[in-house]
Amino acid sequence: MRGQLTYPEISSQAEALAAAWKQLDVQVDWLNKYIGNPSYDEVVFIGSGSSYYQALTMAVTFRKWTGRVATAYPSSEIFLFRDQTVAANRKILLVGVSRSGESTEVILALKSVAHLSNWDTCGITCYEDCTMAQISECLISPLGKEKSTVMTKSLASMTFLMQAAIAKVSGEQQWVDEMEAVLEQDEAVVREADALVKPFIEGKDFKKFVYLGMGAYGGLAMEACLKLKEMSYVWTESYGTMEFRHGPKSIVEPGTIVCLLLSQTARAYELKVAQEMKDYGAEVILIAAIAGEDTAFADLVIEVGLAQVSDEARSVLYLPAAQYLGYYTAYGLGLNPDEPRNLTQVVQI
């Protein structure tokens, strides 16, 4: 049966988030030793593919909530171009991000700095006994494990877990409260995304799909783009929302869907971009905290709620809709999301 792995994994992510929240009490020493340790000049999050895209959101959250320096890079940049990527003579914490903990590139990156006295390493994964956990202490998402090739609940749970960890070490109760509110909201958001995306996609014959996002949602737009490509083989692109106006918008025409992961911080500016794309003939999907008169032009608005919390905290609430868009597009094309072409769950060199 098509989608028998992927669909339940998308749909059960709220349970995985709840387990991740409890895990923080189990691994409080990890929090204090690594991301809560103020001795590091820079925290560098690395991953490959989806793991890199969530690393971008992790770094944004760390910078905003702690006021400390954090960056995110593809794993290969560290073991192949470390001197061009990270400034020398700084105390660095390198955080590997990998669902399986077996990705060749993240393992090579962590091992490549093991001999450097000013670098420490750690990781976040879903598998306690993986190679990454054997060479670096890891934060574990207990229910993030997946049978499907495409990352869905694993990505949501790891993103939430790291953001919640950052909230815990930030010293600001506001961020902890916001992550708890997200946890309580997630199950309803998953159900609503499923109910809205399925009928919207059914019967659609689109030529192009574009995802837009900024801030904490820049990496998530790239991840949403990847989900659609992996599951349905539809050509899609992602851009920073404002950057899309500087040339790339020339691709927009009737038959294009533009999906905007709408922030509250830049809401007015981003909606101007979306309205412009609508005027060019695109169908517009908005994933937003809340709908309003300013979103009435869109063809579909998916509300995730919690407009009162930060854009960073709401990040994982944007993922279910993006994942269901990939799933239902693939299903409508007669494809099996469980068996994406040319892909394996673990990428090794």
Image: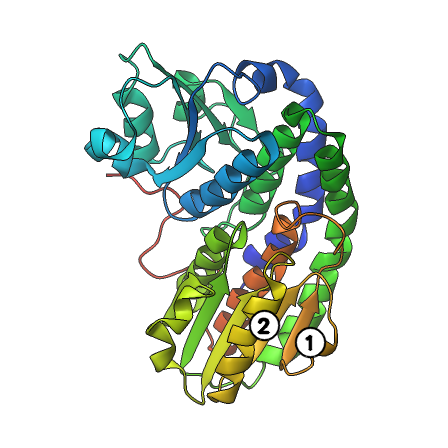
Of residue 336 and residue 309, the one placed in the foreground of this image is 309
**Image quarter in which the C terminus is found:** top left
Residue picked out by circle 2 = 271
**Residue 175, horizontal then vertical, whole percent:** 70, 36
Location of residue 228 with respect to 94 vertically, above or below? below
Q: Quadrant of residue 86?
A: top left
- Label 2 amino acid? Leu
Quarter of image, res 87: top left
Q: Residue at x 55, y 60 (%)?
A: 323
What's the mark number on residue 294? 1
Mark 1: secondary structure: helix
Give the colouring mode of the picture.
rainbow
Coordinates of residue 123 in the picture (x, y in percent):
46, 26
Residue in front for this viewpoint, 15 or 344: 15
**Left or right: 13, with 348 as reference point:** right
Q: Residue at x 66, y 41 (%)?
A: 16
- Judge whether residue 336 can be spotted in this image: no
**SS class, disc 2:** helix
**Image quadrant containing the N terminus:** bottom right
Answer above or below: position of 205 versus 46: below
Give the vertical position of 96 relative to 13 (above or below): above
- On screen, residue 235 versus residue 128, left or right, reads left
Q: Nearer the viewer, residue 74 or 170?
A: 170
CA separation, marks 2 and 1? 8 Å
Identify residue type, mark 1: Asp
